[in-house]
Each structure stands twice: as structure tokens, then as C-alpha cells.
Image (tube, grey):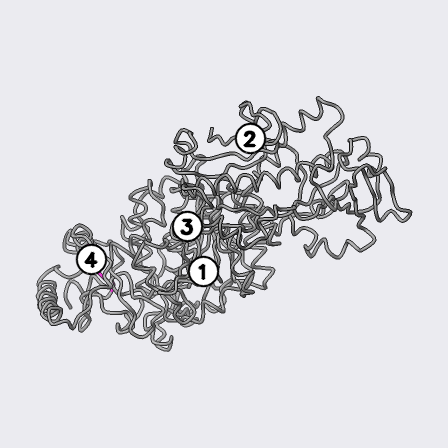
């Protein structure tokens, strides 16, 4: 065979045995023949294109520099079947005959104690030195036309064919990962995994418990440090050591462990669903993934809307998204990779280019592989797939409403609205608040599995309140339409911003009264949902994501208005609006466990004989609230209204301390643009504006700025 043919069977990155020449076409006389053949084909393609018979509009390489980069990449990283007799470079994988895998006896057995890898080693390209090519099984020609899929078989990996047990066959990328471990936990040759360190182990635990709650057993955690491994074992969660990540390791460097984990599973011949730790499963994902046996990679996206020109294809998103960045990026936080020699090659290439530049995210490099460094083309047999990585890896896009991102699920609430059988929720699009905000969103959806009895049975009892009273115009369709159009002002964004802030403040005025009552009684407040008019984003967008102009009114997550971490640090005891519907709470509260509290003008403090109803004067003092409600036996006290129901705390010093404390909890809203800031007479940057609990009273805000009783919009700090 030619040098190219020999190179095709070597691991990517291995040098030619005769010198420093690269694998693939062009290496030796055989390579020259292939180059000549390719040149002949290209000439024919040009002639056909001029006659209008060849379409090239699927090629995303729009610039000369991108095409040059791709040519260099194809020389350095030719398709795995490059140089094979009768196979053209870039030929779709379905037409390539499989190379029978060679069983390789590992050069080292698994030691009793695996020494964690040094975190600094992450930056070293995976194939800087040749690694043995291990294939865990034989080619399965029956896999619905996908001829290169590797199915583990006892005859290949069993004791009769290997010197040692399955546990002696290790991954070159993850030495603690063995064929035996994968066999014990895999279901239909597939595994589900995530990678976390000690800090994020709380997310790994919730990830595992959600899967286990749905009867999923083929899961394990890649532990990025010794403590994460210990915690996994203590929880009974299968786990392997990825290494010992140094304290202070950058986010991008830490994420290289995730690629290494995917490499390790695929290298051993097992399919893998890799997800971020903040993905929570509502159903077993494998039945859906198994419906697409011809896909080499199935990956999620950051889509916010499914546009009519790009309909779904056979249950997957339109592959138009693969070719363009105009709508959204691919999201490697959920990706299913089948164990084929082509996907292994692609993942190894992903690792190499990612490890060479720690300043960028691993997702950036994966997207680059798909959109820039290697070409994609439509899959002729399956319209829901595109053959990517020079035509060798069929890629499909997971449906955005079944594998939902954070915006789709928590803000747009598309699956809930359309009653869709959502499979997973990825807590993305969490603006400004990080992990505490993500956790609160999952709690609201009853998808946080780590709370104990003290969370569901808070000391002192519960205080609930009626939904916020909203201005009459919010319920008037004509008025809402005028608002969305910008009202009567020339600058629509100025009008929308002021109206949005006024609506949120109107609701915060009611919430502060409920917080005062909860403080006086020592009860935990169940907060209602806020209605907003503008979205909260990271950048100056005037309240709407580009290409997806979501103007309210709409119900927003609680973290759009209040800061979850600050609520915790300020000792504000609260629960989200869905708390009473939680399966661990609802059965414990009967009709007799709830007492209603009414506030009526000039009414005396009265309590019904059965205690089921309490009346207090509107504008009550702290003493009156305590007289009527302190020590009430009801598990739940329900406030039938909250607007201006109490004056405040009786002691001025205590009231000021309380006022300062709760005014550290509002969120910022982001952001007006420079033009709108100019209209307001405000500097730019910044463009964000903080909500204020005491907007209608003379006060100093959390930053010491003095406000009159007539609130005025100020950006920053």
C-alpha cells in the first residue's frame, strides 16, 4: 500500500516511520498519485460548476484565509480513510469500508493506586507522543449503514484474547478508566458522564441523583481532584480520577479535563453522552439518542427560537445551524459521541487545538472544527444530519425544546407552555448570578435533589402572599401593544425602560411589606413570581436578545429581580413560588393548616374562633402584627394583599437596619445602550440600573447615593 494507506491506520499525530513527513496524501509516490487524482477531480468539478451542475453553497468557508487554513488542516489532519484504495478524500463515512481493529495488549496494567495527573499536563497536546490505538471490539456492519461503529465483544476483549482482565486495559488519556469499568456500567455500549472538581461536586451529585431518579444506571463522574473522587464514592456514584487539578487553575484549563474524559471513553470503544454538571435530566436521554444510529455526534445548541425557514428534520434541529453563526452557537455542554475511528480522530484533534491555546474555551475550538477548519456537507441518506470533519463524521443537532437550555426552560418556558416531554435542562443563560442563581431556578422547577428536611420544613412556619397586584394597563391588550411599539415617545427604548422599572418597583413595594411581616414573625416567606417587561442580559441590548425581541409582559425567574447570593448573605429566609407544590411539601399541608390574613382600613385586630382567619388594620404597626399573628399555630399564614399593609418596624434603628439589609438584595437590570443613556443624560458605560426597594421614599441606596421620594433613573455604579 501507499504511505498514505499506512498512515491511515496510525493514530493521528504519529510521525511517518521513515522520517518527519506527515500522514496522508502527498507522502511518497503513492501520495503524489492521490494528489494527481484529486487535481483531476477538482478540474472536473470546476467544469461542472460552470455548467451549473454542482452546488457549493453548503461550504461555510467564505474567505480566502479560511480556505487556506482548511487546506493546511486537511494536510495535517486528513480524514482517517485518506489514502485507502478506492476511497476519495472527504467521502462520506457511510461509504467507507471498516478497517478491522487490532487488539492491543496494554503496555502497563492499572496500578492499585492511580497517581493523579498533573494539571499542567493538560496544556500538552494529546498526541504529542504516539499513543497505542486501542479499539474495544469489532466492526458492526449492521448498525443501520454506519459501517465503522465499534461494538465491544467478549471474543475481542475477553480473557481468552488478552493477557489480563478487562481492568488491565486502560485509556491512554484517562489511565484510571478501564474497559472493565466501562463494561460494568455501560448500557447498550453507552455511558453518561460529567467532570467536576470539589467545588462543583454539589452539581455532580445533583446531576447523578436526577439520572438515578429516572432509573438510569450507566453513569459515572470524572473526578478532577481527589476530594471529588472521595465524595463520589461516599455517595455511591461510580467515578474515575481524571487527575489532580491545581487550585487556581483557570476555567478554560479546567475544561480540558472534559475533553480528556470524552477521549478516554471513545478510545476504549464505548459511546458517551458527555454533559456539563449543571445539566439536569428529567427523563432517560438514551432512548432518544438511540433513534439516530447513523449520527457520529449529536450536540445541543444555544438556539432561542426555531425559525420557520429552518424547520426540524426527523426530530432534530435543521443542520443549517451547523453552517452559520448568525443564530446561535453549538453547545458542547451536551454532546453524544459514538465510538468510531472518525469521531475518535475528531475528538483527538479537538483536544490538540484546544490544549495549544488555553485562552479560549473548548467550545470555541469545537465550533471551529465544525464551521471553519474542516468542511461539512449534507448527508444524502439522512437529511437531519450533516457529514462534518471533512465529510467523515455525521453531526446532528439536538432539539432545543427537549434538550432545553436555560433560556428556553426558565425564561421562555417553552416546554411547559406546550406540554412537551422535555428530556434535560441545561442551566445556561444565567445572567450575573452564577451557581446560586442556577440552583434557585432548579429548585423552582423541583429539579434540585439535595435539599434536606430542614429546607422543606422551615422552623417558624411559612408565610405566603397573594400574587402581585399589577397596574390595570398590564391586563389591557391594546395598552400592552402600545407599550411594545414604544408608546407615544420618539425614543421607544426610553419609554420601555421607564415603564419596565416602574412595573418592577410597583411589585417590590408589595414584597417589602411581606418581608417586614415575615421578619416580625420569624417565618419563611414564599415569594410570588415577578412580571417584567424587559429581559435581563449581559450586554447593552435594551432588554432583548438580538434576533429574539422578547418584550413583556412575561413572568421572569426570581433571579431577574433579586440576587440569590445576597438574599442568603443577608439572612432573608425565603422559598420560591412553587414551594407548596413540591412533592415533599404538598402532602404535609392540609386545608386546616392554612390561615388567611386580611388587612382592612381602620379594622381592629381580630382572630376567628377557629383561627382560620385573622383581620388586621391596613397600615398596621409591628406591635399589631405581632399581637394578631405571633404564635399562631397554622403552618401557613397567607396574606390576602400586601400593598402598604404595614408601616414598618416600630424601633427606628431596627427599621433602618432592616431597610438597609433588604436593599442589598435587588438585582441590576442590564443594560441600556449608549444612545439611550444619552437620552437619559447618563454616562456610558455603565449601562446597568439597580432596582430599589425604597424607590418611593427619601433614602440613600446601597451605594450611598441620595434619592428623593421621586425616584430618578441612574446607571451604575
- Please report the residue visible at 74 percent of the width from the left and 28 percent of the height from the top: 649
Camera-nearest residue between 138 and 383 = 383
Specify whether 53 is left or right of 368.
Answer: left
Give the magenta part as a residue range: 75-80
Tell me if mark 2 has few (under 14), some (14-19) or many (20+) residues whose alpha carbon lies within 10 angstroms of its own: some
Q: Earlier in the sequence, mark 1 or mark 4?
A: 4
Camera-nearest residue between 402 and 682 = 682
Tell me if mark 4 has few (under 14), some (14-19) or many (20+) residues whose alpha carbon lies within 10 angstroms of its own: many
Whether residues under marks 1 and 2 lie with C-beta atoms below 8 angstroms apart, the answer is no
Residue 16 in view = no
Residue under label 3: 258
Residue under label 4: 74
Whether residues under marks 1 and 4 lie with C-beta atoms below 8 angstroms apart, the answer is no
On whether residue 77 falls in the magenta region, the answer is yes
Residue under label 1: 400
Residue 225, image x, y percentages: 48, 43
Tell me if mark 3 has few (under 14), some (14-19) or many (20+) residues whose alpha carbon lies within 10 angstroms of its own: many
Tag nearer the camera, 1 or 3:
1
Camera-nearest residue between 665 and 355 = 665
Tag nearer the camera, 2 or 3:
2
Report how far apart the C-alphas of labels 1 and 3 lie in the structure: 22 Å
Q: Magenta residues: mostly which secondary structure?
A: loop
Whether residues under marks 2 and 3 lie with C-beta atoms below 8 angstroms apart, the answer is no
Q: Is residue 625 above or below residue 530?
A: above
Q: Earlier in the sequence, mark 2 or mark 3?
A: 3
Amino acid at each position: 500500500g501507499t504511505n498514505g494507506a499506512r498512515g491511515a491506520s496510525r493514530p493521528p499525530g504519529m510521525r511517518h516511520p521513515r522520517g518527519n513527513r506527515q500522514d496522508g496524501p502527498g507522502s511518497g509516490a503513492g501520495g503524489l498519485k492521490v494528489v494527481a487524482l484529486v487535481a483531476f477531480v477538482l478540474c472536473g468539478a470546476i467544469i461542472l460548476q460552470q455548467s451549473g451542475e454542482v452546488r457549493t453553497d453548503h461550504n461555510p468557508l467564505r474567505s480566502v484565509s479560511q480556505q487556506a487554513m482548511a487546506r493546511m488542516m486537511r494536510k495535517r489532519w486528513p480524514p482517517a480513510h485518506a489514502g485507502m484504495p478506492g476511497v476519495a478524500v472527504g467521502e462520506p463515512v457511510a461509504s467507507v469500508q471498516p478497517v478491522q481493529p487490532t487488539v492491543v495488549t496494554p503496555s502497563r496494567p492499572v496500578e492499585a493506586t492511580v497517581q493523579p495527573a498533573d494539571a499542567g499536563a493538560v496544556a500538552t497536546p494529546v498526541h504529542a507522543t504516539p499513543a497505542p490505538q486501542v479499539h474495544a471490539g469489532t466492526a458492526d456492519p449492521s448498525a443501520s449503514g454506519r459501517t465503522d461503529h465499534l461494538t465491544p465483544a467478549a471474543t475481542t476483549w475477553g480473557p481468552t484474547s488478552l493477557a489480563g482482565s478487562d481492568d488491565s486495559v486502560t485509556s491512554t488519556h484517562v489511565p484510571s478508566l478501564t474497559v472493565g469499568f466501562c463494561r460494568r456500567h455501560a448500557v447498550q455500549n453507552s455511558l453518561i458522564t460529567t467532570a467536576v472538581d470539589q467545588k462543583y461536586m454539589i452539581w455532580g451529585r445533583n446531576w447523578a441523583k436526577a439520572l438515578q431518579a429516572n432509573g438510569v444506571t450507566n453513569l459515572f463522574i470524572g473526578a478532577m481532584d481527589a476530594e471529588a473522587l472521595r465524595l463520589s464514592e461516599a455517595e455511591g456514584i461510580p467515578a474515575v480520577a481524571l487527575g489532580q487539578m491545581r487550585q487556581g487553575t483557570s476555567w478554560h484549563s479546567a475544561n480540558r479535563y472534559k475533553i480528556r474524559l470524552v477521549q478516554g471513553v471513545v478510545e476504549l470503544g464505548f459511546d458517551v453522552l458527555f454533559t456539563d454538571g449543571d445539566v439536569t435530566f428529567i427523563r432517560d436521554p438514551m432512548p432518544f439518542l438511540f433513534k439516530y444510529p447513523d449520527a457520529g455526534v449529536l450536540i445541543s445548541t444555544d438556539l432561542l427560537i426555531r425559525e420557520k425557514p429552518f424547520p426540524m428534520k426527523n426530530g432534530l434541529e435543521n443542520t443549517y445551524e451547523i453552517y452559520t453563526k448568525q443564530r446561535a452557537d453549538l453547545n458542547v455542554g451536551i454532546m453524544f459521541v459514538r465510538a468510531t475511528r472518525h469521531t475518535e480522530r475528531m475528538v483527538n484533534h479537538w483536544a490538540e487545538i484546544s490544549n495549544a491555546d488555553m485562552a479560549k474555551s473548548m467550545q470555541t475550538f469545537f465550533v471551529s472544527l465544525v464551521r471553519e477548519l474542516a468542511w461539512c456537507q449534507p448527508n444524502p441518506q439522512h437529511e437531519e444530519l450533516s457529514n462534518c470533519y471533512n465529510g467523515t463524521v455525521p453531526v446532528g443537532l439536538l432539539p432545543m425544546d427537549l434538550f432545553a437550555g436555560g433560556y428556553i426552560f426558565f425564561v421562555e418556558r417553552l416546554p411547559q407552555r406546550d406540554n412537551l416531554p422535555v428530556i434535560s435542562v441545561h442551566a445556561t443563560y444565567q445572567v450575573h448570578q452564577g451557581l446560586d442563581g442556577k440552583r434557585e431556578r432548579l429548585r423552582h422547577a423541583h429539579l434540585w435533589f439535595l435539599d434536606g428536611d430542614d429546607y422543606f420544613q422551615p422552623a417558624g412556619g411559612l408565610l405566603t402572599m397573594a400574587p402581585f397586584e399589577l397596574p390595570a394597563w398590564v391586563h389591557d391588550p391594546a395598552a400592552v401593544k402600545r407599550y411594545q411599539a414604544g408608546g407615544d415617545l420618539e425614543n421607544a427604548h426610553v419609554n420601555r425602560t421607564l415603564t419596565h422599572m416602574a412595573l418592577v418597583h410597583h411589585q417590590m413595594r408589595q414584597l417589602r411589606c411581606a418581608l417586614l411581616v415575615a421578619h416580625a414573625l420569624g417565618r419563611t416567606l414564599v415569594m410570588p413570581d415577578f412580571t417584567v417587561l424587559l429581559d435581563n442580559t449581559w450586554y447593552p441590548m435594551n432588554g432583548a436578545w438580538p434576533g429574539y425581541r422578547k418584550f413583556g409582559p412575561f413572568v421572569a425567574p426570581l433571579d431577574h429581580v433579586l440576587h440569590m447570593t445576597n438574599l442568603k448573605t443577608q439572612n432573608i429566609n425565603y422559598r420560591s413560588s412553587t414551594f407548596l407544590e413540591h412533592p415533599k411539601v404538598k402532602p404535609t399541608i392540609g386545608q386546616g393548616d392554612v390561615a388567611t390574613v386580611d388587612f382592612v382600613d381602620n379594622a381592629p385586630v381580630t382572630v376567628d374562633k377557629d383561627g382560620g382567619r385573622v383581620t388586621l388594620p391596613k397600615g398596621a404597626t409591628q406591635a399589631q402584627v405581632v399581637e394578631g399573628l405571633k404564635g399562631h399555630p397554622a403552618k401557613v399564614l397567607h396574606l390576602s394583599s400586601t400593598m402598604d399593609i404595614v408601616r414598618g418596624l416600630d424601633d427606628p434603628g431596627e427599621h433602618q437596619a432592616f431597610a438597609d439589609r433588604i436593599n442589598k438584595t435587588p438585582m441590576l437590570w442590564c443594560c441600556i445602550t449608549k444612545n439611550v443613556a444619552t437620552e437619559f443624560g447618563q454616562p456610558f458605560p455603565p449601562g446597568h440600573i439597580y432596582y430599589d426597594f425604597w424607590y418611593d421614599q427619601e433614602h440613600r441606596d446601597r451605594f450611598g447615593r441620595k434619592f428623593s421620594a421621586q425616584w430618578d433613573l441612574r446607571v451604575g455604579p
